Image (cartoon, coloured by chain):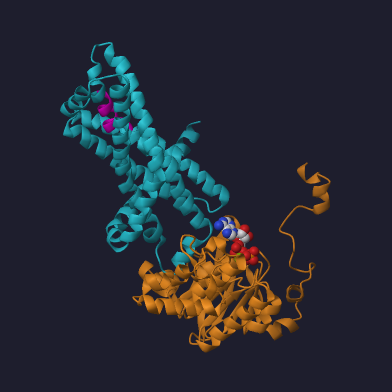
Amino acid sequence: MLRDLYITLRYFVTTFGAMTIFLFELLRHTPRVFFKRFNLVVGQVYNAGALSLVIIMVSGLFVGGVLGLQGYDNLQRFNAEDAVGTFAGFALVKELGPVITALLFAGRAGTALASEIGLMKATDQLSAMEMMAVNPVTRVVVPRFIGGVIAMPLLAGVFSAVGLLGAHLVGVTLLQVDVGAFWQQMQQTLEVKDVVEGIFKSFVFGMIASLMAVWEGYNAIPTAEGVGRATTRTVVITAIAVLISDFMITAAFLKG
Amino acid sequence: MASAAESIIEIEDLDFSRGPRQIFKNLNINIRRGEVTAVMGPSGTGKTTLLRLITRQLVPDAGTIRVDGVDISTLNQAELYKLRRRFGMLFQNGALLTDLNVFENVAFPLREHTRLSTRLIRHVVLTKLHAVGLRGAADMMPSELSGGMARRVALARAMVMDPDILIYDEPFVGLDPISMGVIVRLVRQMNDALGISSILVSHDVQEISTVSDRSYLISDGKVAASGSPDELNRASSELVRQFMHGMADGPVAFHYNAPNYAEQLLGRDTE
Ligand SMILES: Nc1ncnc2c1ncn2[C@@H]1O[C@H](COP(=O)(O)OP(=O)(O)OP(=O)(O)O)[C@@H](O)[C@H]1O
Ligand SMILES: [Mg+2]
């Protein structure tokens, strides 16, 4: 029992350590890759973004709609249904935008990245690059990592914007909340600090989701089964890491 | 023993294990400059592993590997990459980059390491593709190629930087007799015309004897026999004769280590 705990703990610590080293390795190469292989980075931003854009817009629309419904239901009990815009804005910009986008991103773009890199490893493509004196970390891994880190905040922004549209459709169009109240209250209450919190979160989540995806792919056991397992783990670990760090960031921003 | 001037790669007392399984024990091999050296051996003896050791994709447990007299375990990453640019390697399954088309795959090393103009790159790539008979496939994606075609493209890619040492892992598998003849001649021609040294892994005893200057037969982690194709053909050793003439029974077990067949069928091994 105690031994099991020890083994699990040791595994956790070593993996976390290795991941941190890997992250520093990626960050070390980031400036050079960004300037020298800019077109690869752009391609990866496009890739990650294009893969996730549609599901993120659809999800954003419906999450916003639900916020409109729930917010209205809740707020009208206090005769404050005008505040539904503020309610939705807060929820989307600070929480749901970054978090749900990160989860969807992990499920769509993250799995694609992990399995792509894993397959490249399994089919000796990474070894072939090594043999052609090309570092696969700078050619394959870093551009995908940067691409994900850049794409995530953009996607979270899209999610929040479409979400607000959904809340508007439900709140204003369907439930007849005053348009002016809906938007003006939101603008007055939502502070720069809140927006910064949202952007900061989506940036951190982007790092987490991209790091997990490329880590799992790069360290996958190079077989069909190993790549499959890496893909699954990408989603699970990203989800857990995002939710835990969301709590911590929220707490930090409340205090600060 | 060959002197350093004659041998381009020297492997001395090499040990290597994968987990509990010892793949090489005390392996000694000399690859001579300007020759085609064949490495033969039963499936699973570690021929691919040997190539990965020579190019330091894997690191030996003990022993030294010298390329041009330099112990490769002492190289740092930059020096290693510099050395690798002198190698061209054909992987067993081609290992083409799946997100690039055939042309770009062959152009890849040129784009990474040279500042040649687009026109010159085009010229070089098409020449190499022509040599393997696939100039017409330049626009195809790797997923659209057959196994044999993919290996020929990979061969074009391996040659494109004009390496000093060409390494082929099973280049003849999956080729029809015509392409096979062309590739065999190409291997020989490149070796002689460009003064390359070649290492060739293959099971194909027939083809090997036409193309190689010297062969090593590896079995059980050691060199079981070496010499020119003629010498091997005339060798009296049971093992060599078994391999060269493709007999199932002999010192080389056709079967991977397993419990007694009859006993296992009768279910006695589980008791
Ligand atoms: N990644 C690995 N992990 C553990 N064992 C491995 C790994 N790769 C190869 N092996 C083992 O090492 C041994 C040698 O493998 P290798 O691929 O070098 O054989 P080979 O001589 O090239 O065979 P073939 O002619 O079939 O290609 C095999 O027994 C294999 O089981
Ligand atoms: Mg092999």
Quarter that holds the N terminus of chain B: bottom right
Q: Residue at x 55, y 88 (%)?
A: B192
- Name the colour assigned to chain A in the rendering: cyan
How many numbered discs?
A: 0
| Residue nearest the viewer, comparing B22 with B123 | B123
Find residue A199 and report its image quarter. Answer: top left
When the figure is inspected, residue A125 is found, relative to residue A107, above or below; the finding is below
Whether residue A14 is visible? no
With respect to residue A175, does B260 lie above or below? Answer: below
* Left or right relative to B53: residue A149: left
Q: Position of residue A173 (x, y in %)?
A: 30, 24
Q: Residue furthest left?
A: A188
Q: Can you give x and y, in whole percent of width and height, for residue A73 in the image?
A: 32, 15
Residue A94 falls within the magenta-colored stretch: yes
Magenta stretch bounds: A87-96
- Front in this rendered view, residue B2 or A67: A67
Display colour for chain B: orange
Q: For residue A207, say whether it is visible.
A: yes
Which secondary structure dominates the residues rendered in magenta? helix
- x, y percentage for residue B186? 58, 82
